Structure formats: C-alpha cells, structure tokens
Image: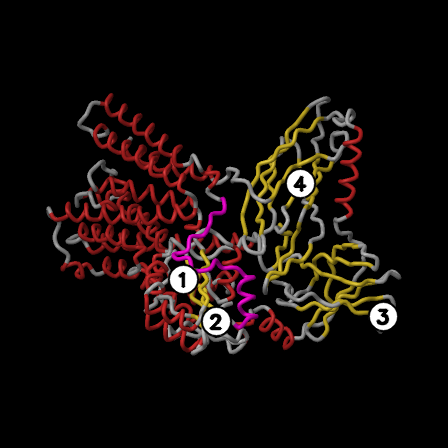
Amino acid sequence: MKQWFHFLFLTIFLCKANISCSQEPSQAPVQVKIVQEPSFIKPQEPFWVAFEFQIEEGWHLYWKNPGQVGMPISIKWQLPEGFSASALKWPYPERFETSELTGFGYAKEVKLLAQIMPPAHLEKDSSFELGAQVDWLVCSSTACQPDRAHLSLKVNSQFPFAEKKEQWQTSLQEFEKARQKIPCNDLGAVAKRSHGLIELQIPSDNQEMIQAQFFPEKQGELEDRISSQLAFSKDLPQTYLLQLKEITPLTTLKGVLVLEIKGGEKKAFEINCPIQGETDALSRVATAETIARPREKQQGEKQQGENGDAEFAGGLGLALALAFLGGLILNFMPCVLPIISLKIMSFVKMAGQKRSLTFKHGLWFSLGVLLSFWLLVAAIFILRSYGEVVGWGFQLQEPAFVVGLICLFFLFALSLFGIFEWGLIFSSWAGQAQVNSASQTKESFANSFFSGILATAVATPCTGPFLGSALGYALTLPALQALMVFTFLALGMCAPYLLLSAFPALLKFVPRPGPWMETFKQLTGFILLAAVVWLMWVFSAQTNSFSLICLITGLLCFSIGAWIYGRGGVPSVSKLKRVSAYALTLLALFIGVEVILLPRASWQAETSSSNSSSDWEEFSLERVAQLKALGQPFLIDFTAKWCLICQVNHLVLSSSEVQAKLDQLGVVKMKADWTKNDPMITKELSKFGRNSVPLYVIYGQNSEKEPTILPQVLTPEIVTSHLENAVGKIIKRNS
C-alpha cells in the first residue's frame, strides 16, 4: 500500500499541473468569439460558423503558414456526438515585414469559417452546444504573446433569428464578405521551372493586374523574404509571369495567389499545380545555399571566436564527436549538481557488490538518459512539424514544468532530512536503502532508470562548450541523423556512470558505508534546496510575485503533509492511525496543489523583462535594424534565467573591466531573454545555427560584415579581446 501511496502522492500534482495548462490566460490584445450564420439546422445539412478575431492596432495574428516567424491559429473542436466540422476556411493573408523576417497573417480583424455537419437523426426543437479551444500567437513590432480561449456556441434546430431581422441580415452580409476572402480554385495557372526559378503563368482575363503575391502552403519551400515582381509575358498574350525562388526542390506548387486588380480590387486563388520542366541541379543548389541561409552564413560559412565553434567541415562525423564530448562536459555543469550528489550516494551503496549487479544499474541509468533524450528530440521535431517554434531546453520555458521540478526537489530534500521516508521505489535516489537482497530487485533497477530521466530533465537546459554548435547542426538534419547526434550526446552524459558501474574497482577509493553517510545525506538535502531556490527564481521571472507567494504556501502545505506522513505512516503505529495519516497527507497535498495552481491563468501572460541593469536594452528586431543602419556597434546577449551558465557569464559581462571596454568602444548592450518561450528569439538563435542559450553576438560598425560569436564560457579577457577585434578603437557616440 505504501508504494501505491507514493505513486499517488507524486501524480496528483502532475495531473493538476497538466490540467492547468488548458486554462484561459489573462487578457491579450485579441478578442475572439464564435458565431453562427443565420440558418435552419437540419439533419445532414451543413451550416456555417465563424471565429471572429478583433485585433488591436499594431498587432497581428498568423496564417496557416506563418512565414519566417510566428505560429498559426489553432482550433480544436469539442462537438456533441454525431456532429462533425469541416477543415477551416482561411481567408487570404497579408505580409508583415519585420527587419529581415517576413510573416503571413492578419491585422485588425479576421473571420475563420467552418461548416458544421449535424447528425442524420436530429430531434425537433433540440439545442446543442458547440465548443472549441482556440490558441494563437499575437505579435507586434516589439513583442509576441501566446494566448488561448475556450469558446462555446449554443445552436438550436429552430431558426433562432426570426425576432431580430436586422441583426441576422447584417450577419448574413458579414458571412458573405468573409466567404469572398476565401481563395477560389479556378484560375488555371501554369507553373514551369526556368533557370532555377519557378515561373507562374497567370491568365489575365483582360484585367490589368498591378500586383501579385504568392503565399506558399508550407514553411521552407519558397523564399519568403522577397516579394516577387509581376511582369507581362511577351510570348504568351494576356498572361502575366510571377517568378518564385525555391528553397527545397518541389514537384507541385501549392499555396494562395493574391492578385490586385487596377482599381484596388483583390482576388485570391488556390494554387495546386504540378511544376513543369526538369530541375536544374546546379541552380537548385545555389538557391538552397544562398536563399535558405541568412546573410551572416553566406560569407564563408564561418563562426568567429576563439572558442573554436564548429564549422562542420567534417559534417556528421564531427557533429557526433562534439555531441559526445559536450554530453560528457554536461556532468560538470552546475545544472546537474543535485543529481551528481544523489548518484554519489548510490555509488557508495554499490561499493563491494557484484560486478554484474553494479553494471546492470549503470545500464538502467544509461537507458533512462537515452530514452529521455530520444523523447525530447522527438517532441521538438513533432512540435516543429505543427508550426511550433521551440529550441533545446524548451521544457523549462513552461512554468508548469518548473513548478513540477520545484516540488519534486523539495520533497526529495525533506526526505533526505529525515522528515519522511520515500519507500523502496525511491530509496536509491535518496540514499536510504540498506545494501541487502531487497535492494537487488526490479524496483531497485527502476530507481536507476528514473534517476537517469531526472538527470536529463535538469541537465538539458545547460549547453557547455562544443554542444551549442552540435545541437544547432543536428536540428537541421533529417530525423534519423539528428537522432544519431542526440544519441551520442546522451552516451557522453552517461559515460562516466556506465564506466564506474562496469569497473567496480574504480570505486575502491569511495569510503565504506557508515555514520558519515547521514551527514552527507543531509548535505545533499541542502544542495537540493539550493536547486529549489534557483528554480523559484526562474518561476518568479516567468510569472509574477503572487504566483511565487502561492508556490511558497503550497510547499508549506507539502511539508506539513510530509511531516504527518513521516510520523503516522510507519508500520509501527496502528492501522487506524496509518489510514488517518494517509488521509491527512493527501488532504495537505491536495490543498498545496490547489494553492500553487490558483494563479495558473496568469502563468502564460507576458511579463516584463528584468535586465540585470538599466543600461541593457530589451532585444527587438526593429532596434537591431536601426543600429545596423546607423553603423552602431552592439552586443546581443541571448540568455535565460534557467541557464546557470548564463548567470555565471553575467558576472563576467557586468565586471568593471568589461563594462569599461563596452563604454570605451560605444557598444550598445542588448539582452534577449529566452526564459519564457519567445518565437522571435528562437528564430534569431536558429539564424546563428543555435537552438539553445547562451549565445553572445557582437556586430561592428559594418553591418555587412559577419558578426562575431563569443564562446559559451566567458572570461573578461575573452570578451574584451573579441570586442577589440570586432569593433576596433572608435570614438564613443550616441545612437
């Protein structure tokens, strides 16, 4: 019963935290509602509904292909039994140019249409409720904010608009206007390949076209940054030509073509036609190399910096080697210090045991690490396939995940202090089991397996030397090759533990179990509490002070529950007292979870960035473009609160030596805070071949010159020398 209780004790919080992610966040600059087109609802006869978005001035939402930045609107239906919904009917989008990035979406307002099909058997005068969860990302020129709404619409089989004739006539007109913005599919365009470009032939129908824009259906197929020019065909009468640049070789051209006719009228058409002509291999390669990659990567494909950032001339082989070495270095990062302390306890327990047994523990630990890395990389690729913009360590950008780690580490610490006993299933983690036959069961191997999972969870946000470039390169590879890189990363991380378990003689210098273990166990508890403090700081940066207060109060309830369980949940007391202790513990746990999740609706709300000092500007693409145009040198610090290496490097950047050099050279300091998920920052990281932080980029006076990439581990000497090389000695000036 005790093991079942432990399982329930942990999973209650995880379930509640998962539920909290589906709650509606605080108000965003978007208002959305679902409305029905006035009509009778009859069996097996579809009717129209619309999602109406009202968008504040200066903000915009994203189309199904968001372009180079952003995430599309997502709608998940909750329909009554027998009802079904058609695919969304997307109006044609418009372009949003932000610095060097192009997005596709909507401003001011937009209506997404869908048809609802009632079941064959529909009772007369019956009413139904249509539900939907709507997720979106709304962006301005300086910020992006994710948001969510849970909508419902009551429909009736009767005509519900008879008494409001003027309103339903207006509604009919609005629906008709919305349908007119849905692309048609009868243009008859032809696509041909010519000189490495796709030439779209557009029949004019005796109408004078002044502009044409093509929006590809999927990301990464065509060059988005360039608005192609419309030209009249000399060889084909009454035909216009639109040239498009491929990023990847295509056989079919799919997307939406928006034509502006003289007089201001716009018409949109669905394009789905095969591309005629053979692919010019040389032109294709040139297009893929020069268009798909950012300007900074085109001039020699080099990353500057004495850290030796990988140029990957060795391709996949070099990436595998760097991944293994980077994974090995992860064991020395501060992120994994709590887990290292727990593993030392387990090695002390294994001293003197059979070689076969210790090796099995090492294999199970390694399997936990490998499986965790595989699941993380699979999650990244799946999320990206659905248009999500994520990078390495994305799990710590979610407040719910951070809260889960805080609660887990806090309960571990209480157990190590002797407040309560975890029981057999967590005994090896906490270092409390005796070395006997009972610890050699399947449950003890499960302990090693789950410790590998926990080690991966806290280690992945860290990217030490050699690792950043390997990760960035891996996420550009096909799925199978990327999986190989991450497998080598996992093997590098678990190699020391596997080596020690395979050769128990290496443990001969480890002290034998004794009274000293109790002192070391409690010391480990303080290390875990330090990790709790760090994670609470991260959580406060992601949310607000009220959420932090609720979290602390919830942990207090957890500690009360743990104390009750430790006093009354032991075999020495009567069954009645044990059952009472279990009940009171669950009650304390439940109250703690409810208190922690009380402000969960605000967890996804945008929070103001908190720079370490006032002279660090908040990162924005518009400011970057402005500084480039002015020829003003600037430094961008890509960082996150959950990145401990970043915090250590901040001490270097704030040192008097570095600050003096920055002031002397007139360098503008800019901070890109990635503590919470920010698609814009994720996109910028990918431009430099990175999918994680830290990243430090220096732009000199010449914006056309390739920027300088600093090492991931900084010293004052490294920073000042790179500043001198990148900027040179210039006169300080105001921007």
Residue 191, x across and y down, in percent: 75, 65
Magenta residue span:
605-631
User: Does any portion of residue 440 appear in the rendered image?
Assistant: no
The quadrant the N terminus occupies is top left
The Cα atoms of the two marked residues, 4 and 1, are separated by: 40 Å
- Secondary structure type for disc 2: loop
Residue 98, x across and y down, in percent: 60, 60
Q: Amino acid at mark 2?
A: Arg
At 32% from the left edge and 73% from the top edge, which residue is drawn? Answer: 717
Depth check, mark 4 against mark 2: the one in front is 2
Chosen colour scheme: secondary structure
Specify which label sits upstream in the sequence, 4 or 1: 4
Which residue bears the numbered disc 3?
236
Residue at far right of view: 206
At 51% from the left edge and 56% from the top edge, which residue is drawn? Answer: 381
Which residue bears the numbered disc 2?
733
Q: Is residue 616 magenta?
A: yes
Q: Amino acid at mark 3?
A: Leu
Specify which label sits upstream in the sequence, 1 or 3: 3
Which residue bears the numbered disc 4?
51
- Secondary structure type for disc 1: loop
